[in-house]
Amino acid sequence: MRMFLMAALLASAAACPVHAHEQPVPAAQSKPVPKEDLLKPPADAAHYVVVSEAGKHGDQWRWQLPDGRTAYRWSQELRGWITEMDQVTTFAPGGTVDALTVRGVTMSGDAAEEFRVANGRATWKTATDSGEAAAGGWYIPAAASASPMPR
C-alpha cells in the first residue's frame, strides 16, 4: 500500500510543470565599475569599521557631496568574498529617498542599481530586477551600503 501511495504521489508531482518566472530573464549584465573608479572618501568622511571576533573585515564611509547628496563607500573582504561599492543618495526635504545610485561589485556580482521617485512613482533597476510602483512604501536596495529606506 505504501509503495502504491508513493508511486501515485511521485507520478502526480512529475506531471506538474514548474515556472520560476513569468517574465523573461534580464539581458546580460554590464561589467561592474572597477574599485579604482569608485568614489574616494574625503579625509573628513564619517568612517565605520566592519569587525567581528576574527578581526577587521572592511570599512564604510559616509559624507556629503558639494551638491547636498549623501555619498557612501564600502570596502569589505570576508573569507575571500569581496565587496567594493559606492552609493549616492538624494534625500527629499522630509527625509525620504528621491534617488539612489549604486555601483561596484558584491559577492553576487555587479552591484549596479538605480532608484528614482518622480511624479508620485518609484522606479528601480538592478542587475536582476526592474519595476515601478506608487511612491510611499519601502524600498530595500538589492546591494546598497545604507539601510532600507522609504520610497
Image (cartoon, grey):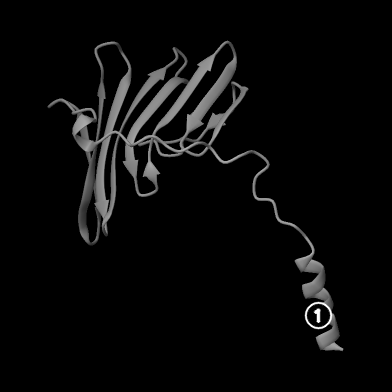
Residue 23 visible in the current orientation: yes
Q: Name the foreground residue: 81 vs 98.
A: 81
Report which quarter residue 47 is drawn in.
top left
Q: Residue at x 54, y 23 (%)?
A: 123
In the image as oriented, which residue stretches furthest toward the left?
A: 43
Q: Which residue is mark 1?
A: 7
Name the spot of residue 65 as percent of width and height, x first. 26, 17
Q: How many marks?
A: 1
Q: Is 132 on the left-hand or right-hand side of 67?
A: right
Name the spot of residue 86 as percent of width and height, x first. 30, 32
Q: Residue at x 39, y 18 (%)?
A: 90
55 in relation to 12, above or below: above
67 in relation to 124, above or below: above
Name the spot of residue 60 as percent of width and height, x first. 25, 38
Q: Is 28 on the left-hand or right-hand side of 51?
A: right
Q: Amino acid at mark 1?
A: Ala
Q: Secondary structure at mark 1?
A: helix
In the image as oriented, which residue stretches furthest toward the front?
A: 28
Q: Residues within 10 Å of mark 1 (few under 14, many from 20)?
A: few
Q: Name the foreground residue: 125 vs 142.
A: 125
Q: Is 110 on the left-hand or right-hand side of 58?
A: right
Name the spot of residue 92 as percent of width and height, x first. 45, 14
Q: Residue at x 87, y 89 (%)?
A: 1
Report which quarter residue 14 is drawn in.
bottom right
Q: Is 63 on the left-hand or right-hand side of 122?
A: left
4 in relation to 32, above or below: below
Q: Residue at x 69, y 51 (%)?
A: 19
Residue 151 visible in the current orientation: no
Q: Name the foreground residue: 112 vs 65.
A: 112
31 in relation to 91, above or below: below
